Image (spheres, rainbow, N blue to C red):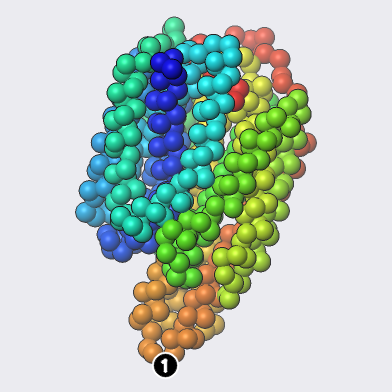
Amino acid sequence: MRKWLPLVAISLSTFMLLVDLTIVTIALPAMASGLHSSFAALQWTIDIYVLVLAALLLAAGSVSDLLGRRRVFLAGLLLFAVASLGCGLATDPGVLIAARGVQGIGAAAMYATNAALLGTTYTGRDRALAFGVWGAVNGAAAAAGPILGGVLTEHVGWRAIFLVNIPFAVLAVLIAVRSIVESRAAGGRMDLPGAGLFTLAVTLLVYGLIRAGEHGWTDRGAIAAFVASALALLVFLLVESRRADPMIDLRLFRRPSFTALMVGGAVLTASAFANLMFVSLWAQSVLGLEPVAAGLVLTPLAAVSFVVAGAGGRLLHGVAPQWAIGVGLLLVGVGTLLCMLIGPNSTWTALIPGLSVTGIGVGLASPVLASAALSAAPPERAGMANGAMNTFRQLGFAVAVPIFASVAAGQARPVLVDSGLFGDPGQAAIRLTGGGSEALLAQAPTAVRAAVEHALRSGYAAGLDRIFLFSGIAALVVGAAVLLLVRAPARPDPEPTGRPVAASAPGA
C-alpha cells in the first residue's frame, strides 16, 4: 500500500484545485451578499483563479524541471492552503480576489507537476493504473464541485468552501513529504520574459472584457486594456520566436492538427462550463432555489460526462482522436442549443435535456484531448504540448465568463426597457445577470411587483438564451474544424528543438 501514497497525495491536490474551479459558482449569491460585492467583483472572484492558473501552467512546469518537481509541488500545496485560509477570512471583495489569485499560483504549481510526478514515480502497469485513478479524480472533481459547494454554502456558510481545503492540503503535504521522491529535467532554463508577457496579455484582455461589460464597449479604460493586451501579445510572440528555449514553441502552431486541438480545448471549456456560472445565478436569484438544489441543477452535465468518460475509454480504444473530440464538440453544441428551451416561466427541469447531451459531448472529448495534443507534437515537445492544452482549456473558461456576462446583460437590457418599470434599464440588466434579481424585486412598489418579477425572469431568460446560442454555434463550428483538420499523429520535426520536457502521460 505504501507505493500508492504518492498517488493519494497527487490525487488530493488535483481534486482540490479542480473543485475550486466550480465550487465558487454555487456560492456567488451568498458571497455577494456577505461582502456587498459588485458583479465585476463576482467575475474576478472566479476569473482571477482560472486566469492565474492558465497563465502560469507552462512557467510552473519549467520551474519544476529546474528546481525539482517534488519541491514545486509541495510549495504549491502550502501556498494553496495559505491562500484558501485568506479566502475564507476575507472581509471585502478586494482581499478575496487577491487571495484567489494566490490560490491560482499554488494550483498552477500543483497541476503542472502532477503528470510528471506520476510518470517518474510509477512504471508499467502501475503507471497505467495511477493515471487511470488520476483521470477518474479529475472527473469526480467536476461532478462534486457544484454539490459540495451547495452543501457547504447552505449548511455552513460560503467561507467553508475555501476553509475545507486546509485539512486536505495539510494531509497531502504530510503524505507527499514521506512518499514522493524528487525528480527534475536536465538542462533548460526558465523563460521569464515569455511567462511575464503572456500573463500580462491575458490579464489585460480579461480586465478589458470585464470593464466593457460594466461600462460599455466604448469605455476608454476597456479600449486601452484591449490595445495594451494586443501589444503585450505581439511582444510575446516576437520574444518567443527568437528564443532558443521558449516557453511555447510557436512552430507547433504551423501544424493544423495542433492548432485545431488547442482551439478545440478552449472552446470545449468555454461552451460547456463557462455558462454554468449564469445558470447557478439564475437558479438561485430568479428561481429562488437553495444552494444545494442549485448545485443539483448542474449535476446532469457532470454526472453524464463522468459516466461517458469512463465507458468511452474502453469503447473508443483505437478510434482516431478527431472523431471523439469532433463529435464530442458537436454534441456540446447541440446540447447548449437545447438549453435554449428555457423561457421566462421555465423551471430548472428545462435544462436537463441540454445539460445531459452536453455531458455526453464532454465525456467523449475531454479524456482524448491531452493524448491528441501529445500526438500532434514531436515527442520531445510532449510536455510542452500537454501544458499548452491545459493552458488553452483554462483560458477558454477565463475569457468566456466576461464575454457571456456582457452578452447576457446586453440581451436583458431591451427586455427591461420594454417593460418600462426600471429607471436605468442598463444598470438593472447588469445587476440582474449578476444575481441581483431579489434586490431589484425588493425595491419595486408592491403594486407592480408581479410585473417586475415577470420582466426580470424574461430578461434573465433572454440573456441565458443568447449565451447558449453563442456557446452552441462556437462548439459546432470548432467541432467541424477538428473533424476536418486533425489527422493521425505527426512525425517529429527533423529540425532541432529546445529543452527536454517533463515526463508526461497520454491520459494526463
Q: How many marks?
A: 1
Q: Is residue 346 visible?
A: yes
Whole-percent x, y for residue 477 in the image? 71, 47
Is the residue marked by circle 1 packed among few (<14), some (14-19), or many (20+) residues within 10 Å? few
Outermost residue, bottom side: 447
Picture layout, residue 259 above or below residue 465: above
Residue drawn at point x = 61 percent, y = 61 percent: 351
Q: Is residue 261 left or right of residue 29?
A: right
Residue drawn at point x = 40 percent, y = 15 percent: 2
Outermost residue, front side: 1
Secondary element type, mark 1: helix
Q: Nearer the viewer, residue 230 or 206?
A: 206
Q: Kindly identify which residue carries mark 1.
A: 447
Q: Is residue 477 visible?
A: no
Q: Nearer the viewer, residue 504 or 398?
A: 504
User: Residue 27, located in which quarter of the rendered image?
Assistant: bottom left
User: Residue 35, located in which quarter of the rendered image?
Assistant: bottom left
Picture layout, residue 490 above or below residue 462: above
Q: Nearer the viewer, residue 193 or 292?
A: 292
